[in-house]
Image: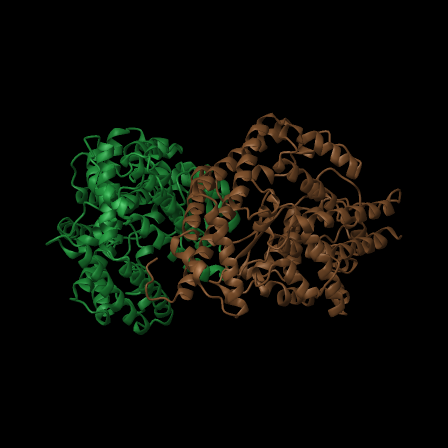
Chain colours: A green, B brown
């Protein structure tokens, strides 16, 4: 960049806009890879993505940007303060990781991911054990390169996903939450289960239903699109373009719909981020945990509520008039609580127990207390102790998740942070919007979205997530909020 | 790039592979912009494309690559000779254009394109005249920066699209071709026209027909895809991923189908390029003219032949059994010759007269002999003199094409070069494949594609297009070939 005439602050913004544009292009390359790319494009795409990451790293660690990050004076404008803090954090993380290590990690992740798919298909740890062990060694190397003084090594990873969250705050949270969740489970033990929703829902009308329901939430199709993929996801391809990908099941209406509510929550967060801060680097989500709070809010707090089941029953019956459903039927089916082996299909209560197990195991893998060879039995023992179930296949046990094979150590807590934030947002919203649930039942979700737009989305990364949530909700006991939310749901669904 | 341990030749290849990856990403960003992007993404996409072009220019003019281009010894390996010649040409074009001019051109093109859409919609030159005049001044500046000694200024532009072609070769070609085409037109003047194909063809089955016919040509759907857009196009998104976009008309089956044949021809060329030369910069089409020869070959030489009409009638009648068509009906409708105002809907004979007019006018605009304000009347006079028709609207006159508004001066001759090459390939192929037309009539197009794969596609940019075509066809009179091809078609279609 040849910009001799710009002020240091303007030059910084120009460089940050470039990084944002690169992120958009990287998002597009990933979206296309998973949605539209023909099989023949796979090799070129891997190479293109590698190059884009390299360019991003080059530009983020460019000596001039490093110099600007170090020397800019933030003054006392809170926007500028946040922008420079965010820039310094990004530059520090990038410059501390040598280019050689960035490349080695990328290569090891690709290798380990392939080994994972093979191991999972064969139900055999062998092909995966070596690559994962090697990848863990590289992650440790990265931690050592980035670590400040006596910080817990795991905090380095958390800093990349959820700045402001540390082991010191997660440990007691998981301990309390686990105990409370077990109490919730005890409340429903032995009670008759609400029946699941069974039937067949042809895909073409089901697709229209997904689009109508996501549009009813407030997902803006002029700034997004709806596609179908094996695993639902959402992704931003630049300001004004946040895409949603769903999976429809002909024999399971609710599994598909809750997935779409979840992804619409993510995508609506992206659609609500502050464009006016483009070029400041804080026009992005405050953290992955806060991102998950938005998806879980729409999937769970709203999507599994009795009020929303009114809307959902109306829309479903419009689409499938031959097999009408009642709101209470939907509510029961959406709020069954039952220990199960696979995280992504878990109910709202047991979900966080799955996360607690992963948090414990990945810390042990990174510290060296647990070897990869011991992972399957440690996993199975953990599941048995927590949920009373023992996996019989690795694909429903230690190999079920993609995260570790892709180097995503430190990400799992974001899911539980999302659930915690979403419950705190629920109670705050109920206090400020007295007609919330009546509005939802009538099909008017603009109050809920407006609240999130104003208080969360529009704030971008002005504050780290814990501070931003506290600014919205006031000081609250997040664990207590989540447990209260779950206890209320269980009371309604099980009549206890 | 930090590659101290690579040999100069290996380092060059690594840098060229990066440029190829960037081209793939730029292709993807354009494809998405025209096919899948929601309206809200437009602003971010423009910015992303600007950045990608900047990065491409930075990397192509990187001092180390310039040094490698100057100092590498090609030796006598023809592949290496071609690779280094191609690299030197690209580096020379890029380094001679200052970054400031690259940016100014990009900005002026965006501005002029928008002005063109406005002017065309209003049928008023006014909003377009100023921006186009400014853009022409920048194009002249670029020509001056890139021009070698006494070369014709227009040759600088040709060098970017069709290296090896010059004004000195185009001028006499257009003179002879124009005279010959007027003779062909005279032959059909006053004869009864073959009737057009009229009817209604519902879009869903028509879509399946497009896919089946393009697959029958040999377009590989594992390395491509079919989408629909306002203007048909095809684009490469990296080796192994060449995409085709079609437009279907419910009331004009043949207009849509010929467009798909045309784009499949382009995309099959991309699919056949030599992957083994990835990183050499010659794993690409030899020229735009040769690219057009591939699209025109499938659209015209094959697609409008009596033999192909056998196949097309069978496929069409399978898809639309209620309104069967006869091969001779299709052949007549596909080979009507009739002067018309709009190039993209022109028949095979008059098409090149449209190009000859544009070639003359754009040279006059660039030399200053013609001012933009005089363009509409010069255009209308030219049309009247050439085809005996006078436009009554700018949108069917001087404003019909997008090219000039996008800075694509010097591109039009590529279309006629494509037609010339395709006729020479026809007669060469007929001589070498005696069963060609019988095979086509039976629906077996593998001989034709195999010939092009082996002799054109697989050669990448080993030679410039004129030399490559001559290597395949031997020395031939291309103008005579094209006129012979057209005269034969007219004889068959009009029974003269």
User: Which residue of the protein is positioned furthest toward the left in this rendering?
Assistant: A150
Q: Please state the horizontal and vertical placement of residue B330, each as a whole percent of the image.
A: 78, 52
Q: Is residue B364 left or right of residue A287?
A: right
Q: Is residue A266 left or right of residue B325?
A: left
In depth, the one of B72 and B258 nearer the eye is B72
Q: Quadrant location of residue A358?
A: bottom left
In depth, the one of A289 and A386 nearer the eye is A289
In depth, the one of B121 and A472 nearer the eye is B121
Q: Which quadrant holds the N terminus of chain B?
A: bottom left
Q: Is residue A487 left or right of residue A28?
A: left
Q: Please state the horizontal and vertical placement of residue A220, each as a whole percent of the image.
A: 43, 37
In depth, the one of B447 and A163 nearer the eye is B447
**Numbered marks: total:** 0
**Above or below: residue B239 compared with residue B414:** below
Q: Quadrant location of residue B291?
A: bottom right
Q: Residue at x 78, y 41 (%)?
A: B339
**Above or below: residue A324 compared with residue A430:** below
Q: Is residue B476 left or right of residue A41?
A: right
Q: Residue at x 71, y 61 (%)?
A: B425
Query: Does residue A329 show up?
Result: no
**Above or below: residue A94 compared with residue B364:** below
Q: Please state the horizontal and vertical placement of residue B168, each as a whole percent of the image.
A: 68, 49
Query: Does residue A138 show up?
Result: yes
Q: Residue at x 36, y 47 (%)?
A: A23
Q: Please state the horizontal and vertical placement of residue B116, each as a whole percent of the image.
A: 58, 33
């Amino acid at each position: 960049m040849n910009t001799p005439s710009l002020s240091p602050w303007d030059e910084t913004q120009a460089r940050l806009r470039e990084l944002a544009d690169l992120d958009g292009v990287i998002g597009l390359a990933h979206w296309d890879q998973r949605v539209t790319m023909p099989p023949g494009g796979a090799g070129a795409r891997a190479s293109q993505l590698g190059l884009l990451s390299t360019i991003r790293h080059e530009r983020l660690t460019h000596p001039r940007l490093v110099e600007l990050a170090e020397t800019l004076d933030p003054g006392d404008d809170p926007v500028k303060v946040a922008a420079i803090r965010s820039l310094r954090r990004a530059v520090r993380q990038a410059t501390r990781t040598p280019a050689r290590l960035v490349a080695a990690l990328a290569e090891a992740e690709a290798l380990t991911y392939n080994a994972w798919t093979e191991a999972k298909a064969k139900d055999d740890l062998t092909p995966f054990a070596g690559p994962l062990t090697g990848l863990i060694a590289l992650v440790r190397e990265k931690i050592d390169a980035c670590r400040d003084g006596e910080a817990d090594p795991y905090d380095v990873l958390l800093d990349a996903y959820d700045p402001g969250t540390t082991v010191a705050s997660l440990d007691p949270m998981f301990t309390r939450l686990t105990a409370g969740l077990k109490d919730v489970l005890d409340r429903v033990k032995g009670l008759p289960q609400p029946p699941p929703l069974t039937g067949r829902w042809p895909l073409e009308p089901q697709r229209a239903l997904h689009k109508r329901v996501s549009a009813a939430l407030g997902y803006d199709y002029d700034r997004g699109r709806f596609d179908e993929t094996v695993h639902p996801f959402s992704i931003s391809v630049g300001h004004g373009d946040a895409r949603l990908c769903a999976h429809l099941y002909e024999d399971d209406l609710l599994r598909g719909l809750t997935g779409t509510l979840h992804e619409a929550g993510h995508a609506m967060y992206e659609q609500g981020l502050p464009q006016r801060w483009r070029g400041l680097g804080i026009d992005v989500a405050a953290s992955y945990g806060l991102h998950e709070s938005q998806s879980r809010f729409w999937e769970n707090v709203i999507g599994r509520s009795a009020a929303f089941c009114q809307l959902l029953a109306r829309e479903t019956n419009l689409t499938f008039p031959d097999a009408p459903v009642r709101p209470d039927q939907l509510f029961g089916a959406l709020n069954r609580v039952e220990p199960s082996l696979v995280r992504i299909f878990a109910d709202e209560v047991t979900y966080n127990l799955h996360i607690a197990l992963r948090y414990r195991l990945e810390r042990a893998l990174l510290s060296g207390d647990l070897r990869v060879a011991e992972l399957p039995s440690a996993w199975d023992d953990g599941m048995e102790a927590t949920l009373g179930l023992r996996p019989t296949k690795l694909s429903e046990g230690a190999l079920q998740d993609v995260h570790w094979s892709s180097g995503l150590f430190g990400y799992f807590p974001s899911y539980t942070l999302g659930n915690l934030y979403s419950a705190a947002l629920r109670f705050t919203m109920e206090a400020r919007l007295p007609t919330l649930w009546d509005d939802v039942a009538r099909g008017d979700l603009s109050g809920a979205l407006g609240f999130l737009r104003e208080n969360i989305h529009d704030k971008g990364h002005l504050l780290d997530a814990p501070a931003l949530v506290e600014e919205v909700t006031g000081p609250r006991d997040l664990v207590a909020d989540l447990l209260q939310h779950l206890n209320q749901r269980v009371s309604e669904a099980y009549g206890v």
